[in-house]
Amino acid sequence: MRRKFICGNWKMNGTLEETSALLGGIVGLWDDAYRKVEVAICPPFTSIGLALDKLSGRGVQIAVGAQNCYSETKGAFTGEVSARMLAEAGCTYVILGHSERRTIFNENNELINRKIKTALNVGLKPILCIGETHEERELAQTYEVLLHQLTQCLRGVDVTQMKMITIAYEPVWAIGTGRTATAEIAQDSHSYIRSEIGKLYDETVASQITIQYGGSMNAANAAELLEQTDIDGGLIGGASLDAKAFTAIIEAATK
Ligand code: 13P
């Protein structure tokens, strides 16, 4: 049985004041049953320290992650943050390959692949995002796009390292649009991803890997998505900024 994994991607939201308030809300609504679920939040870099502070010793089990890191270990890369810095700051996870990074910041699969390896080298667990655009879906290229992103981003990642990786299926057309993939569409993509991972690695890796769904997941649709065979959790944007909505999604994942 794979353990469900719910992760909040705060994106560029969360001043120190907002971080305190939001985490205070989540801690207040926390139920011991949520321990069944792996829970994480990925706030902006500047709030990571505060988030760890706010979560420690509060009786909650919530890991902290980052939303990006650079592919090099150190040096003259103005504005970038290394994987080691994040690990040292207390991060467990790092989101890589998010479609916003791909489209707004021109990240390609090759760069994402290097970032994944850098993260793995310091023990940071990558959450690799893959997903098709609306146009690609219309052109029936979804499988092709998913397979291409998977093979390119995971190039050189071995079976042992795969234990550290979470895949997030995030159809670009469902992100921030309020247009969730139907449970059927999401399950279909998840099952495809799992079967391809089986071919790229082996059946054990395929059956153990966590595949999250991301794209307008909220308190109302989480239960239906999470009960699909191959949907092992969620990468939550907007709804993770609301303590009630986020805990309701965690609650759905306990079922
Ligand atoms: P929304 O939940 O706001 O659609 O964002 C999803 C996402 O991009 C998570 O990484």
Image (cartoon, rainbow, N blue to C red):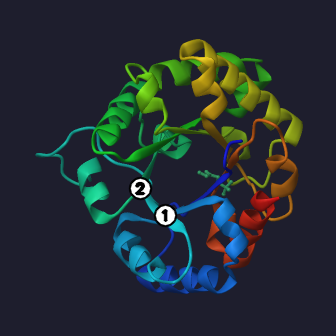
Q: Is residue 253 above or below residue 150?
A: below
Image position, residue 208 (x, y; %):
62, 34
Q: Residue furthest left?
A: 75
Residue at point 55%, 18% (across, down)? 148
Residue behind mark 2: 92
Residue behind mark 1: 63
The local secondary structure at tag 1 comes to strand
Category of crowding for the residue at label 2, using alpha-carbon neighbours closer than 10 angstroms: few (below 14), some (14–19), many (at least 20): some
Residue at point 30%, 56% (across, down)? 87
Depth check, front residue: 18 or 225? 225
Are the two marked residues, 1 and 2, in contact with CB atoms closer than 8 angstroms?
Answer: yes
Depth check, front residue: 2 or 98? 2
- Quadrant containing the C terminus in the rendered view: bottom right
Q: Left or right of 144: which side holds 12?
A: left
Image position, residue 241 (x, y; %):
62, 71
The local secondary structure at tag 2 comes to loop
- Mark 1–mark 2 distance (CA, rounded to whole Å): 6 Å
Depth check, front residue: 243 or 160? 160
